[in-house]
Every structure is written in structure tokens, then in C-alpha cells.
Image (cartoon, rainbow, N blue to C red):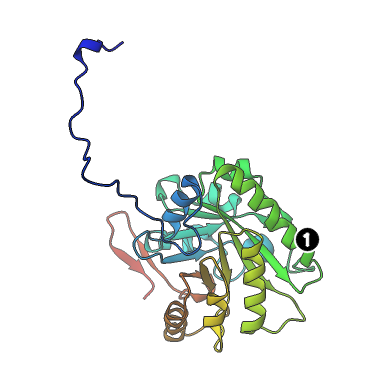
Amino acid sequence: MADLDDIKEGKDFGIDRPQQNTLYTLKGCGSLDWGMQSRLARIFNPHSNRTVMLAFDHGYFQGPTTGLERIDLSIAPLFADTDVLMCTRGVLRSQVPAATNKPVVLRASGGNSILSELSNECVAVAMEDALRLNVCAVAAQVYIGSEYEHQSINNIIKLVDAGNRYGMPVLAVTGVGKEMTRDARYFSLASRIAAEMGAQFVKTYFVEEGFEKVTASCPVPIVIAGGKKLPEHEALEMCWRAIDQGASGVDMGAQHLPVQRPAHDAEGGEKGGA
């Protein structure tokens, strides 16, 4: 126990200087709890509030699709060049070294496949397992206008409630109902509903006309999905336009990566494809 006689009275109280509190400036997230903000600050650069995510969670319903046949060969070499990884817990445990030290957005919905109705998903990860994996957010699809719309919204609600208990952000990913047009009106509707249900950020698609209305009407950050494969220049232009019109980041999947990728040997040099 400390000797009370040795405790010196403090002198530097800065009485003439008010306490400085640093505000968290990520859109719509200033009132979140410390743990929630801490995780989001790993996903979004705290100085720019921007992010570049690498999504390779498609196998949860597509299986070994083109570009994702071997995560260790096609995706792992890119880990160092992205801000955030988005994947399933199976791939995270089996293919992503813990020493990678990248923030992870964990796919937390599933139970469907390309052979059936895509909107028929359930919550596929317990929040306790997401915490065990030390991820920075969990993600689930929301299918507005689809056959299982209510179920997908309920999945978001369940994750948000659990996330609020443990300080875990939720990313809502807007899937497109079969009867809905891919336009600003639809994505504004889907994104706003996801935010209203409590999602801390939303992943949606860029549209040529009216995208600024999508971002303006959503009270939390929007990250754009890569969508269909585009030539490299067009993909980069799409990303620039999305950020210019209010998006907070981009989440590009394997379809936007070149067929041949440089591989790094143990000494750090490049070998392989051009």
C-alpha cells in the first residue's frame, strides 16, 4: 500500500485551460458508445472518414466462384493493400493469418445459395463468436421488396440489438428484390430502412443518376459495392464519383481484380503475372 506521507499534492491542473474533448466525426456516429466508435475507427480512417474494403465473402452462397477458388492464392496477397477485410468466419479462421492485423467485417447472414431464393437468409453467426474472433463489425443482407423482406429486416434488428449490447457495429448490405429497379429511389429506400433499424453503416450500389440523394437521405455512412465487373478505369471512375457524391468508402470484390496478380516471395520481391 502506498505511504500516504509520500503522496505529493498535484500542481498542474490547467485551471485556465478548459478540457478538450475530441468529437467523433464519422457521419451519424458521434453519439455511439466508446467501444462502437473504436471499432468503426479501425474500419474508417479517423482522419478522413474513408475506407477501402476487400470483400471475399461471396462463397457463403456462391461457392468457389471465379476469382475465389483459392483464397490463399488469389486474395491473400492483397491483404496488405486494403484497409478492411470482409469475409465469413470459416474463411477467416482457415485462410486469414491472425498476424495479418487488418480489421474484419464478418459476414453474419447466410443459409441460402444461388440454387434457391437468395432473400431466404437467417442470422448465421452468434455475436459471442464475432467477439471471440475480435472482428470490427458484422454484416447481413437486407432484401427490400423481396419474398423474405421481413425476415431479412428482422435479421438486421437481431444483430443490431446484440451489437448494442456488446459494442459491435452492424453493416447492412442492400440486396435487390427481383421486382425492384436498381435506381436511386430503390437504394434510397433500402439504405434508409437499414439505417432506421439501427445499422451503423450501409453497403449499397452506385447508380448513375441521383446517387447523391441516396447518400444524403441515409443518416449513416454508405460504402458502395463493386457490382458487376468493369474495366479498371471505369471501376476507378465509379469509385471517385461515389465518394464525390457522398459515399464514405468502397468495397470491391474479386470480380474487380485482375485475372493474374503479382505474388510476393519471402524476400518481398514480385514474381508471377503481369
Residue 247 x %, y %: 48, 74
Residue 206 x %, y %: 55, 80
The structure residue drawn at horizontal position 62% and vertical position 58%, both measured from the top left corner, is 198
Picture layout, residue 133 above or below residue 249: above
Picture layout, residue 145 above or below residue 194: below
Q: Is residue 268 left or right of residue 187?
A: left
Residue 177 x %, y %: 74, 75
Examine the image and state in which quarter residue 217 appears.
bottom right
Picture layout, residue 153 above or below residue 146: above
Examine the image and state in which quarter residue 210 appears.
bottom right
Q: Quadrant of the C terminus?
A: bottom left
Q: Amino acid at mark 1?
A: Gln
| Residue carrying label 1 | 151
Q: Is residue 189 left or right of residue 237?
A: right
Residue 63 visible in rendering = no
Q: Nearer the viewer, residue 209 or 205?
A: 209
Q: Residues within 10 Å of mark 1 (few under 14, many from 20)?
A: some
Q: Nearer the viewer, residue 232 or 221?
A: 221
